[in-house]
Image (cartoon, helix red, strand yellow):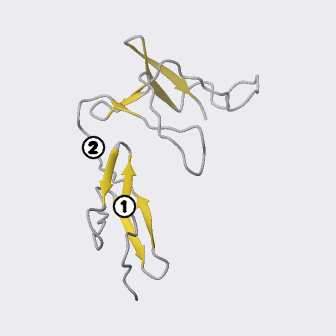
Amino acid sequence: MPVATTDAFRNITIGATTIRAEQVGDTLTISAGGNITLTPNGTNDSFEIAAGLTLTADNSTNASNYLIFSDSATGSFTPRTDINLYYNPSTDTLTAGVFAISAVSTSTGTPSNTTTPTGYMQITINGTQRYVPYFT
C-alpha cells in the first residue's frame, strides 16, 4: 500500500479540542474507553464504534437507585430518569409519585372463593402498611 506524501489530515476537531498533525507521517491514534469496542476495517479505511453497558447486581445497598427508561421501545434512545421513581435494594421498595393500576377484569361478580382470601398484598400508603386481600 502506498504511503501518502502529503497530509491526510491537518486538523481534526472533537468537541472543543483540535488535534493537529505537526508533520507528514503523524499518526492519529484512536483508543477505546470503558465499555467501548473499536473494530477496524483496514480494507475500507474505516472503523466501527460500539458501546456497551455493564450491569452489576446490587441486592443489599441502602440507597435510592433511579430507574432508567426511554420514550422508545426499540432502537437508539436517550436514557432518562425521574426523581420520583426509584428502587431501594435493601428494602425491596419501589417508590413512585403515583401508581396507576389497571383492572384485570371488569366483572362485577364476586370472587370464586369469598370466605378465605388466597393471600394478602402488603402495600404502604403514606408510610402506613396496609394489607389488601386477593382471591383467585
Residue type, mark 1 in image: Arg
Find residue 97 and report its horizontal and vertical position in percent: 48, 18
Q: Secondary structure at mark 2?
A: loop
Residue type, mark 2 in image: Asp
Disc 1 to disc 2, C-alpha distance:
48 Å
- Residue 99 vs 22, above or below: the answer is above
Q: Nearer the viewer, residue 123 or 21?
A: 21
Query: Which residue occupies 60% across, 50% down?
Result: 74
Query: Does 76 sit left or right of 79 as displayed?
Result: right
Find residue 89 and report its horizontal and vertical position in percent: 30, 35
- Residue 111 vs 38, above or below: the answer is above
Which corner quadrant holds the N terminus?
A: bottom left
The image's mark for residue 43 is none
Mark 1, other Cα within 10 Å: few <14 / some 14–19 / many ≥20: some
Nearer the camera: disc 1 or disc 2? 1
Residue 58, picture quadrant: top left
Instruction: Name the residue beneath numbered marker 1.
Output: 10
Query: Which residue occupies 30% across, 71% down?
Result: 24
Instruction: Name the residue beneath numbered marker 2.
Output: 58
Find residue 46 and report its horizontal and vertical position in percent: 46, 71
Find residue 99 and report its horizontal and vertical position in percent: 54, 22
Q: Could you tell which of marks 1 and 2 lies nearer the N-terminus?
A: 1
Q: Nearer the viewer, residue 92 or 3?
A: 3
- Residue 32 vs 14, above or below: the answer is below
Query: Does 19 sit left or right of 81 as displayed?
Result: left
